[in-house]
Every structure is written in structure tokens, then in C-alpha cells.
Amino acid sequence: MMVIIKDEIYGTIEFDELEERIIDTAAFQRLRRIAQMSVTNLVYPGANHTRFEHSLGTAYLSSLISERLGLEESEKKKIKIFSLLHDIGHVAFSHEGEDVLKRYIGDHETLGRDIIRKGEIADIINENYSSKEIAEMYGSKRGMIVEADIGADRMDYLKRDALNTGVAYGMIDIDRIVHTLAVEGNELCVTEGGLEAAEFLLVARFMMFSAVYLHKTVRIATAMLQRAIEGSIEDGTIKPEEFLYMGDAVAYERMLQSQNAKKYVDGLLRRRLYKEILSLPEKKINMKEAKELEKKLSEQFECDIILDYPTKFSKAVELKVKTNDGLKTLPKMSSLVNSLQKAEEERRKILVISEEAVRRTRGEEIRKAVLRFI
């Protein structure tokens, strides 16, 4: 018996009984309480969708891709289960929380493997398949339908994030991409007929990072959130592994009990955010130097000053295009993709931020101190 779920993008999505039971587990239901875009809703109020619906959408797209590639029925089922669970290891606050917590407990792929291998979800999977086999799809050739540059995960989050933020950058031609996908030499690629659609997806990703994910105010809120997470761990209020079992709201409540974290959480909940004092090109100082400068400035001016180092938009594009002369990487065939990578480098800025009162009263002194350092 199939269960039908209505999705804001794809309409009707169907799941079989085993998939429904996975969805109904406590670990999967926790994804309802983790915002897909963390603190981005402080800038884009509609960005309140969660890891839960993204996981359902990714499973739907992976099924379309599997069908297009003509995979065997058993393999289709396994890939759909993996795609459904690909984000099961996310801690509270999604990637923004992971950036702090991964040095304590590992990244979401590592945590996801552990959740899939043992416990309630593993018991359900093992009735028909192997939970170990599903867990090993992370980072593998078999997982490429989900994880590739042009895989189900990326297509869903770009389209869903754009829809919920209200920006126009996520207009991806999913049908065209899916219908031009192929497998060549164990690699997911597009045929030349899908070149423009693939380019457009990468343009959409660049624009989403530039205008949404790394929006200046989003970065400031993220820096405050990460200070709160770190502070609550340092003073023993929360153990790192507890973030794997909490949703965002509970994590906020717990962090309010931390002396180190409280002022940051109060600022986030009231939207009293730190302000930019100065921005400078990333190439001016490296990350280690930025941390040293952050400490010096905070000590010199006796206040909390944060130097936020920019997150990379993406790793190098590895997408392959199937041509009459064999596989070629997309950057070799597309001057547009090359120009995007150059534009990314130019837009990467280090932000120097602090409380509004500090910027107002000592901002000019701090700017001069930073410029003397570099």
C-alpha cells in the first residue's frame, strides 16, 4: 500500500509501506524541527521550510533519475531509501551547526552512517535490505544520483530554497536535466543536449550563495549562532552530541541557560544582530591571521569583535558532459562556468562585526586598527 504526501513543488509524492515506516521514526521526524536554512529567515521571512520536506523532495527526484537511467527495481528502492535518509545525520541548525560541531562529533555524513547502521531505522531497512549497504552509499558511486553536482539533493534544495525565500534564482529546468542524464564509466553525466540546463543550475547555485546563503546579514546571524553553540559547549551547558537529538527550538532554549551563549541567543531571537564595521577581500589575510586579529581586537577594545571568514561557495565543478569525443568536464566546455568560479573568488569578503553600540562609538578606531594590521 502506498502513502501519498502532497509537496509544495512536485505535487503528489508516493512512498511504499517500508519508506513510510522510516519516515515515521523518531529520528526522521526530528527533521521537521530543523530549519533547512537555519537563521536565513531573519532576512528572508519565508525561509521556514525544514530538512523534512527537503528529504522527501530529494527522494522523489532520485526516483525520477533512477527511472531515467533504467536501474533495476531493487537498486531503485535502495537509492530512494538512501536519498530519503541522506540528511538524517544533521544536527540542530543544519550546516551552520555542523560547522562548529563536526570537530567534536563528526560531519552529518558520518553521523548519518551511524544512524542508518543501527537502531530503529536499521531494523526497518534490514527487513528487506541491508542497512550497512545503504549507509555505505555516502560518498560512493552508487550515491551519485543524490550527491553529484547535478544530483537530486542539489536540484531540490536550490528549487525549494528559492521558492521559500521568494527569489527568482532557482528556476531550474529539472525535467530537462533529468531527461539528459546518463551514466558513463560509472559517472553521472549529462549529454550535450543538457549542457545549457546544467549551466543554468550552476548559475542558480552561484546566485543563491551570493544573494541568499552568504547574504551579509545571514552571515552575521550565523556567526552569532556559532558563537552561541561554541559557548554553550565550553561552559558545559550542552554536550556536543546532544545537538544530534534536538531540533532548533529546543537547542535555543537550552543555550539560553548558558552564560556564554545567552547574549547571542537573545540577539538572534529579538533580531538584535551585530553590525558590520568593515569588510575586506579574503586575500588580504588568511584564516589563521583572521583569528589572531579577532583576538587582538577584542582584547584591545575590550569588547566582542568577530572576524567572519567567508565560506566557499562550492568545491571545483566536477560535472562531466558526454560528447562524441568522450567525457569532458563542464568547465572545459563552458566559459560561463569558468567565469562563475572567478566571480566567486572576487566576491569573497571577510566581515568585521560587533554590537551596534560598538560600531557607533568605536567603529572608526577598529577600522583603522584592522587596516594597520593588513
Image (tube, rainbow, N blue to C red):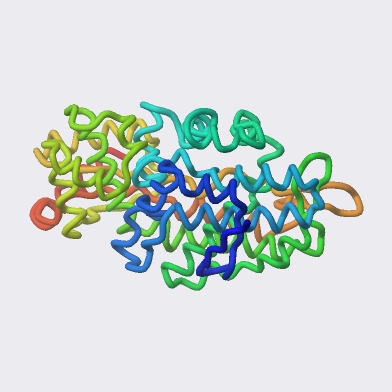
Q: Position of residue 19 (x, y in %)?
A: 58, 48
Residue at the extreme right of the image, as rendered = 324
Q: Position of residue 36 (x, y in %)?
A: 42, 54
Could you say which is closer to the camera, residue 346 or residue 373?
346
Judge whether residue 31 can be spotted in this image: yes
Horizontal arrangement in the rendering, residue 265 relative to residue 151 (left or right): left
- Say which quadrant the N terminus sits in: bottom right
Judge whether residue 139 can be spotted in this image: no
Q: Position of residue 341 (x, y in %)?
A: 58, 52
- Say which quadrant the C terminus sits in: top left
Above or below for 239 versus 65: above
Could you say which is closer to the camera, residue 211 or residue 165?
165
Residue at 25% across, 43% down? 251
Could you say which is closer to the camera, residue 53 or residue 292?
53
Horizontal arrangement in the rendering, residue 80 relative to residue 243 (left or right): right
Above or below for 308 versus 215: above
Residue at 27% across, 46% down? 225
Horizontal arrangement in the rendering, residue 72 relative to residue 89 (left or right): right
Residue at 29% across, 41% down? 226
Count of labels shown? Answer: 0
Above or below for 112 versus 326: above
Residue at the extreme front of the image, as rendered = 1
